[in-house]
Image (spheres, rainbow, N blue to C red):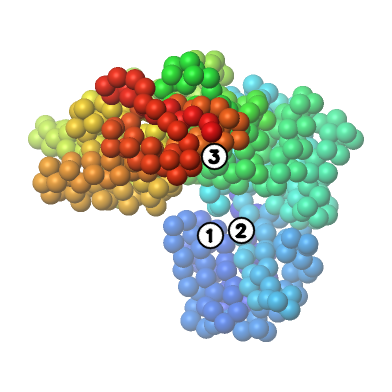
Amino acid sequence: MKPKRITDDLDRLLDLLPLAVQQALATPNSREQLLEVVLDLGRVPEARYPGRALALGEQCLTRDDLQTTVDRLGQFGADNRAGIERTLHRISAIRNRQREVVGLTCRVGRAVFGTVAMVRDLLDSGQSLLLMGRPGVGKTTALREIARVLADDLQRRVVVIDTSNEIAGDGDIPHPAIGRARRMQVSLPEQQHQVMIEAVENHMPEVIVIDEIGTELEAQAARTIAERGVQLVATAHGNALPNLIKNPTLSDLVGGIQAVTLGDEEARRRRTQKTVLERAAEPTFPVAVEINTRNRWSIHADVAATVDQLLRGQLPRPQLRELDSDGSVRLVDAQPSRSSSPRPALAAVPLPDPKAPSPRAAPPAQDPAEAISAERSDQRALQVLCCGITPQLVDEAIRRHGWPVRWVDDLNEADVVLSIRKGLGHQPTLRRQARESRVPVLVIKSDTLPQVERALERLLARRAGPQDQLSHSESQDGDQEDALAALEECRLAVEKVVLPYGRPVELLPRSEQVRQMQVDLVTRYRLSSDVFGQAEQQRLRVYPP
């Protein structure tokens, strides 16, 4: 059986829209997978679907058309959102400086049954669960069904904190999609954290479901609730864990980050600089899920271990799960994380057939000639070793463009190392091995999809030309970025440790040319320094005044 999808009275939403829009969306094909309808003053109305948008007619929307729609909707809340009673549809307003409505975003609300199978085993564990993903990927839809399963199937006392009536619909009676779960509405968005605490103190819930944790007060309230033994299921702004770690407002959800000064011996053992970033506390949410697409989720069953790996420049390996068309869950990559921490059992998730092809391998071909061609094609794929870059971003870029690229874990298999700025600074051994093996290094500014796409496109274009040109160019880029990282390391050591605390700091091993640049920088601060170590381990020690 395919997962059952229920659209909540789409006609009730379309009846509120201008007549020309209703006529344009009259056919069943135009309504299939409809995400939202956008109405902007002076523009042609637009229907949005996954990955595309469609103009509805040729006439621009007039002020009368817009005002008629607003009058049918009724009153907007403090968050500029309105709804239709006992449906999951949401209408958001855009206002001008005079507070007049000049645009409407009409989001289609659906209750989808079947997606909870992706995390059914995690719900049984009783651990708090955090969902992340880009807007429109289905976070709220998943949250709604999780609330129903926890309340109906697992017989838990569930309270939904519904700030914008998006989870359980508009009106005083919750939508049947949340089952027996109770719903608490929030009069003002800025009071969401207060309602979260009130739910714990007054209604004795076993589980609290929250949509869109976005402020520091809400993050603090979530930690308070978790410390009282209540299971949390929530969504947060951010596509993936690395985004959450970089967000100073929400980083506490995954344990928070603090700067720590290591001792000399510990810094040598880690082969890193003395001032490093480490996790400050246990995560509020021990388990996190990145919703890559509606049918593909990445599971971080040990958030603490994943955060520690990211802060040390290592590559975490989340478990990838896909929902097949028949409603079963398939493990795309069942390879465990490098952490030794125990993971929850996956009894509810069927393992793939051992005879099935590996997700990374080329699909089997019927004709032997086609099989040989596919094997050669896989051999010609550009093999990339990621340093400080989320592998899921590389996977997504490859899927989008169909590029002959795959990422590897072993430097011996890599054609190129792709790193973020300062990424190789946390892994001097990898940098040295890449230089000795003459593996080119390409450094990008940040761990984002556009940066990764541009880097892969550049690598593929260079690969089509002479190989020596690639190696020479990329090694020059790597040397420049290495020098910049060394100077930044030296500056931070001086300004964060040497001057304020009066302690000497030993920097990472660098080449003679780069060490001289660091000496020049130290001299500008009117400080002294000296070189320690032998051969490739020579490094600079900076002394206080």
In this picture, is 247 found above or below 355?
Answer: below
Marks 3 and 1 close (CB-CB < 8 Å): no
- Asked whether, in this view, residue 491 is left or right of residue 81, the answer is left
Q: Amino acid at mark 1?
A: Leu
Marks 1 and 2 close (CB-CB < 8 Å): yes
Q: For marks 3 and 1, give the one nearer the viewer.
A: 3
Question: Residue at 69% across / 73% down in the picture?
Answer: 95
In this picture, is 437 found above or below 489?
Answer: above
Residue 108: give its label.
2
Q: Residues within 10 Å of mark 1 (few under 14, many from 20)?
A: some
Can residue 502 be seen by looking at this rendering? yes
SS state under label 1: loop
Question: Residue at 79% across / 44% down in the picture?
Answer: 193
Disc 3 from disc 1: Cα separation: 54 Å
Residue 269, percent from left and from top = 44, 16
Disc 3 from disc 2: Cα separation: 52 Å
Residue 39, percent from left and from top = 59, 73
Give the mark nearer the N terminus: 3 vs 1.
1
**For this rendering, which residue is in front, 539 or 40?**
539
**For this rendering, which residue is in front, 126 or 37?**
126
Q: Amino acid at mark 3?
A: Glu
Q: Which residue is mark 1?
A: 34
In this picture, is 258 found above or below 34?
Answer: above
Question: Residue at 67% across / 84% down in the picture?
Answer: 64
Give the mark nearer the N terminus: 3 vs 2.
2
- Asked whether, in this view, residue 383 is left or right of residue 443, the answer is left
In this picture, is 355 found above or below 372?
Answer: above
Q: Quadrant of residue 270?
A: top left
**For this rendering, which residue is in front, 36 or 283?**
283
Q: Which residue is mark 3?
A: 495
